[in-house]
């Protein structure tokens, strides 16, 4: 949601800002804009709609200069329009602001500013910031921004420029992500690393209530009281190519195909000398983990499905009572906890507002929080007591794929680690389970080689209006994930159910127009699953099953099958998710959907 970029240096400023905005496009937006200081004048170009519209505007009305800020807006206050697009400016059109987040007290501030004769051009909350900076400006933009920020309530990351101090960009963070990219004779800022990676690998992650003043030859950092501070510079281990589609038609497909590599990378990072290593940010001692007697996993969407699989793993293998909650419910539900309760937050982006609020709720109850996160240095990672990074690399497609399988992999690693501390598995069993992991990347590769079979099934079913996804046991959440993937990118209604629930209601829906996608691989609930599929078949239902390679019995109760390699049951969600991702992808692509940026959705949901 909302993306911010900023650049100061010798390159063509509008091109650098635009390329940054293209990289942030995945976050979701409905309008965009840039502001630059060109020949001493502040110039703003902004447009409702896609970035292409802004690009065309810039071709018609080009701007130059050596510094500027840019923004992709996801409307919260005020409808999507040219006027409400950022940057927003002050009364004199000398100060421009871009903002990600929400100003909660904007209404009161706006009323006061109007009384003081400020003239508003938009219905955004952001515009109040431009007018506040205008009131406080006495020749020093940094001081003016610090004073303006004191009056703001809510969450925000902002970048501000002024034609009266045309050698700097002032940025401030409180609650919404903001990183600074350090270059040679150029510096950048952005909401996320992808926007700067083409220019530099050296980044500084701003903490809440920190400010950065970017000049061409350096960046200074300050506290909210204006005290100068030193910040740690981090090297980002990404290559610029990580951000490309690599010859695939969509990021989502590329990311599905990256899964063998992601799992390989995780195996090499997490298993060292036949022992589990949860990484240098893990921060939990064996003693405190051994005492944990209850776990609450909280997350949203796909990450919640990964957490749900975690419940099956943690209870079965580590024998720890585990609840799994959707963050937007968890944060308001006042759960019963005790001093030995561990809260686990799972998030790809590390910025999801509800998951973050769940962490804060947990901390208010003095609970320890472990997060399982993809994005390095994200807010969720920083606010947790310990972090397990899932090492999936940048995920650009809005529909999460490789992050899901990497989340499940890392939840499994944590489970085994905890199980050893709790003595619920012996060393030999642990070693056996670790060695089983080696076959996982190849198993995924084998499924990817059958992509044409899956595409064929997608062609056959792409016009259906409803789908039912069924699974049992540890693959019930996998079925939920399959249904979510399909609905979010194809806009086809899909719902996931535990197969045992069929006869308690959903069986009434089954007919030839409601394809049933079933996970029927060999498992402890295999026989039960086949019975459920018989029920569907005898009601005239059409069954598409994910089955274990060579399993003739499962094929006999299915109309279409996708074969997957035989893997141990606790690894099966990682393998079984892949054909469901491909099925959703092909159905959406064949229907001409905007696969990487489905309507109404954003990659990083930073508002409640
Ligand atoms: C679906 C999807 C979303 C996210 C959810 C949580 O494909 O990507 O359901 O899983 O918005 O996002 P994170 O994991 O960033 O907290």
Image (spheres, rainbow, N blue to C red):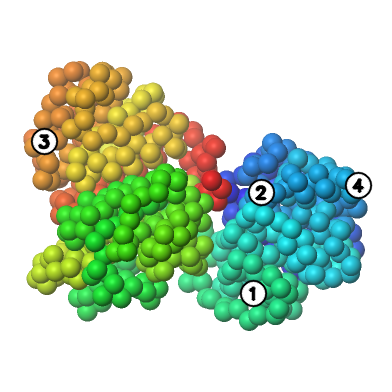
Q: Nearer the viewer, mark 3 or mark 4?
A: 4
**Residue at coordinates 8% horizontally, 37% vertically from top-left?**
527
Distance from Cα at disc 1 to Cα at disc 4: 40 Å
The answer as to whether callout 2 falls within 8 Å of ligand 1 is no
Q: Which numbered tag is attached to residue 528?
A: 3
Q: Secondary structure at mark 2?
A: loop
Distance from Cα at disc 2 to Cα at disc 3: 52 Å
Q: Mark 3 near mark 4, Cβ–Cβ under 8 Å?
A: no
**Residue at coordinates 13% horizontally, 65% vertically from top-left?**
424
Q: Quadrant of residue 412?
A: bottom left
Q: Earlier in the sequence, mark 1 or mark 4?
A: 4
Q: Nearer the viewer, mark 1 or mark 4?
A: 4
User: Disc 4 designates what residue?
Assistant: 117
Find residue 5 and report its horizontal and vertical position in percent: 67, 59
**Residue at coordinates 81% horizontally, 59% vertically from top-left?**
133
Examine the rendered structure and indicate whether residue 204 appears above or below residue 338. Answer: below
Q: Earlier in the sequence, mark 2 or mark 3?
A: 2
Q: Which numbered tag is attached to residue 182?
A: 1
Q: Decide if residue 236 is on the left or right side of residue 196.
A: left
Q: Badge 3: few (under 14), some or many (20 or more) residues near its Cα, within 10 Å?
A: some
Q: Decide if residue 516 is on the left or right side of residue 86.
A: left
User: Disc 2 designates what residue?
Assistant: 104
């Amino acid at each position: 949601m909302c993306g911010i970029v900023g650049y100061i240096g010798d390159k063509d400023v509008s091109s650098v800002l635009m390329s940054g905005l293209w990289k942030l496009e995945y976050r979701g937006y409905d309008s965009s804009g840039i502001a630059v200081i060109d020949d001493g004048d502040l110039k703003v170009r902004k447009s409702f709609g896609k970035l292409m519209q802004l690009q065309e505007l810039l071709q018609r009305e080009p701007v130059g200069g050596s510094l500027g800020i840019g923004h992709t807006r996801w409307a919260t206050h005020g409808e999507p329009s040219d006027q409400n697009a950022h940057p927003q400016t002050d009364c004199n059109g000398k100060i421009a602001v871009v903002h990600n987040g929400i100003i909660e007290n904007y209404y009161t501030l706006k009323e006061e500013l109007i009384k003081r004769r400020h003239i508003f051009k938009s219905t955004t909350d952001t515009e109040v910031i431009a007018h506040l900076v205008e009131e406080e400006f006495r020749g020093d933009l940094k001081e003016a921004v610090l004073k303006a920020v004191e009056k703001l309530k809510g969450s925000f990351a902002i970048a501000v420029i002024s034609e009266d101090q045309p050698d700097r960009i002032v940025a401030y963070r409180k609650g919404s992500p903001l990183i600074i990219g350090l270059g040679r004779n150029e510096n950048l800022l952005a909401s996320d690393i992808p926007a700067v990676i083409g220019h530099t690998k050296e980044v500084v992650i701003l903490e809440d209530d920190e400010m950065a003043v970017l000049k061409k030859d350096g960046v200074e950092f300050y506290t909210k009281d204006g005290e100068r501070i030193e910040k740690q510079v981090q090297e980002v281990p990404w290559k610029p190519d990580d951000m490309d589609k690599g010859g695939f038609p969509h990021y989502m497909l590329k990311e599905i195909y990256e899964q063998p590599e992601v799992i390989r990378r995780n195996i090499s990072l997490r298993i060292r000398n036949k022992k589990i290593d949860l990484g240098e940010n893990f921060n939990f001692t064996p003693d405190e983990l051994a005492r944990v007697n209850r776990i609450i996993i909280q997350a949203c969407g796909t990450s919640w499905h990964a957490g749900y699989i975690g419940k099956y793993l943690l209870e079965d293998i580590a024998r720890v009572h585990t609840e799994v909650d959707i963050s937007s419910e968890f944060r308001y539900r006042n759960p019963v906890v005790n001093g030995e309760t561990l809260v686990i937050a799972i998030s790809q982006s590390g910025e999801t507002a509800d998951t973050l609020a769940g962490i804060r709720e947990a901390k208010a109850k003095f609970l320890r929080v472990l997060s399982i996160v993809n994005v390095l240095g994200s807010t969720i990672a920083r606010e947790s007591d310990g972090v397990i990074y899932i090492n999936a690399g940048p995920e650009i497609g809005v529909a999460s794929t490789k992050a899901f399988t990497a989340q499940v992999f890392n939840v499994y690693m944590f489970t085994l680690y905890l199980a050893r501390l709790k003595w619920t598995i012996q060393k030999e069993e642990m070693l056996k389970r670790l060695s089983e992991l080696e076959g996982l990347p190849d198993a995924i590769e084998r499924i990817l080689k059958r992509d044409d079979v899956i595409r064929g099934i997608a062609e056959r079913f792409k016009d259906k209006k409803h789908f039912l996804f069924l699974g049992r046991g540890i693959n019930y959440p996998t079925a939920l994930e399959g249904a979510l993937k399909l609905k979010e990118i194809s806009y086809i209604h899909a719902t996931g159910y535990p197969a045992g629930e069929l006869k308690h209601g959903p069986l009434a829906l089954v007919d030839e127009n409601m394809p049933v996608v079933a996970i029927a691989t060999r498992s402890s609930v295999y026989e039960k699953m086949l019975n459920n599929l018989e029920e569907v078949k005898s009601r005239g239902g059409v069954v598409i099953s994910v089955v274990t390679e060579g399993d003739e019995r499962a094929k006999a109760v299915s109309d279409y099958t996708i074969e997957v390699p035989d893997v141990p049951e606790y690894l099966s969600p990682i393998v079984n998710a892949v054909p469901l991702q491909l099925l959703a992808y092909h159905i959406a692509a064949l229907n001409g959907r905007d696969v990487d940026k489905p309507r109404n959705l954003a990659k990083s949901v930073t508002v409640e």
